[in-house]
Image (cartoon, rainbow, N blue to C red):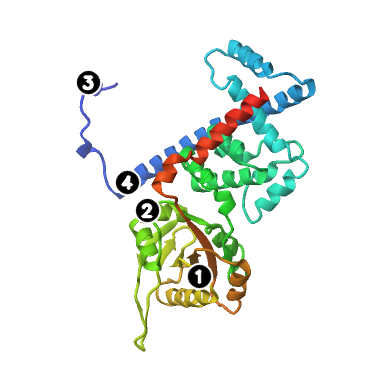
Amino acid sequence: MANKEDNKPAFVKRDSIVTGKEYSQLLGALKDRFRKSQIKAAVKVNTTMLEFYWEMGRDVARLYENAKYGSAFFDCLSLDLKTEFPGQTGFSAANIRYAYRWYTFYNQANTNLQRVVEDFNEDKNSNLHQVGEDFEMPADFGLIPWGQHIDIFTKSKSVEEALFYIEETIKNSWSRPELNAEIDDDLYGKHGKAITNFDDKLPAPYSGLAKDILKSPYDFGFIDKKIVNEKQFEDELASNITRFLLELGQGFAYVGRQMELKMPGGQTFIPDMVFYHTRLKLYIVVELKVTPFIPEYAGKLNFYVSAVDELLKQDDDNPTIGLLICKSKDNTVVEWSFRGMNQPLGVAEYKLGMTKKANEMLPSESELQRIIDTYDERIEE
């Protein structure tokens, strides 16, 4: 029989609850398990909704394109669905049109889509290869919210570019503003444009992963003054280290600058900046040049990478890489300069921002894109 005292209101005293190592482990395990269950539930709901949009886009495409309906088709379908399911979201004419455009965007390259996806996801564990002749929605699409899918396919110029942003969004857990910032910054266009010797100096698939963290050009738009020497360049980046890290990308951690290297013979060398990549577990030596690339730069960077490998690298770290960021480069000169070098090196370009006054006078890329999208929709109507 229940004790009447148990039914009375009372404060639970935290101090009276059992504590200890076992209790902490239990509490931690339950918290982690519940968070994972929340994520699984959210992904399942999102996947179900996206599958509906995918199939709606497919069915609408088949009828709309074959019957050659006018733009009133979407308004009529929206009205009928809203009438049948009052209070439900997702049935606006604009959203139905997005579903139609989403499906047709990936369906437009149906003869080459399988090859494109397989090539793009080489050495990656991904479900995107499920795109095929049946045009079922790829499983990985369910890991991204609908709004981000809209931003990706409406702003991408090709299926390859869209798949790139899908992979990066999943890998980096980008929010919608973060995704749009990377699209506006043309991360796809910069990705893999740095010249490296990683294929020769690093084992696969590690070489590919290392190339993925570099890009070219780096956009240092937060520097709005004329840069005349390396010291000034380094000072500006160091004083804006947070923005510099954001431009370098996910996983970069700042170790230090002007780390003096003293040799037994009395010589002193000073690399510009040193970073550590937390995901790949490796050091990155960054050298900065305000002039075009010349072969001598590669030799000096090769020396600094060797020094970091010898003095900073731990047993469980991967090989250190060197990154030279310069004003401009000739790819052939860079590739020839790498011959004979024994360390993994990369060379990328940078661009500085316009003056603040010029930035204020010109519309942003996102504003221009909105204008283009509005114009396209009017043309379709």
Q: Which of the two discs, 3 and 4, labels the residue nearer the N terminus?
A: 3
What's the amino acid at mark 1? Answer: Pro
Q: Mark 1 points at which residue?
A: 319
Q: In the rendered image, is residue 49 in sight? A: no
Contact (CB < 8 A) between labels 3 and 2?
no
Contact (CB < 8 A) between labels 3 and 4?
no
Considering the numbered disc 1 on the image, is that residue within a helix, a strand or a loop? Answer: loop
Q: Residue 106, how many percent across, how many down?
A: 69, 38
Instruction: Kindly indicate the quadrant of the structure image that contains residue 342.
Output: bottom right
The crowding category of the residue bearing disc 1, from other C-alpha atoms within 10 Å (few below 14, some 14 to 19, many at least 20), is many
Q: Nearer the viewer, mark 3 or mark 2?
A: 2
Considering the numbered disc 2 on the image, is that residue within a helix, a strand or a loop? Answer: helix
Look at the image and tell me in which quarter the N terminus lies.
top left
Measured in 3D between alpha carbons, the distance from the residue under mark 3 to the one under mark 4, in whole angstroms, is 29 Å
What's the amino acid at mark 2? Answer: Thr
Q: Mark 3 points at which residue?
A: 8
Q: Which of the two discs, 1 and 2, labels the residue nearer the N terminus?
A: 2
Measured in 3D between alpha carbons, the distance from the residue under mark 1 to the one under mark 3, in whole angstroms, is 65 Å
Give the side of residue 4 with respect to residue 296, left or right.
Answer: left
Q: Which of marks 3 and 4 is in front?
A: 4
Considering the numbered disc 4 on the image, is that residue within a helix, a strand or a loop? Answer: helix
Q: Is residue 2 above or below residue 326?
A: above
Give the side of residue 12 with respect to residue 111, left or right.
Answer: left
Measured in 3D between alpha carbons, the distance from the residue under mark 1 to the one under mark 2, in whole angstroms, is 25 Å
What's the amino acid at mark 3? Answer: Lys
Q: Mark 4 points at which residue?
A: 24
Q: Which of the two discs, 4 and 2, labels the residue nearer the N terminus?
A: 4
The crowding category of the residue bearing disc 4, from other C-alpha atoms within 10 Å (few below 14, some 14 to 19, many at least 20), is few
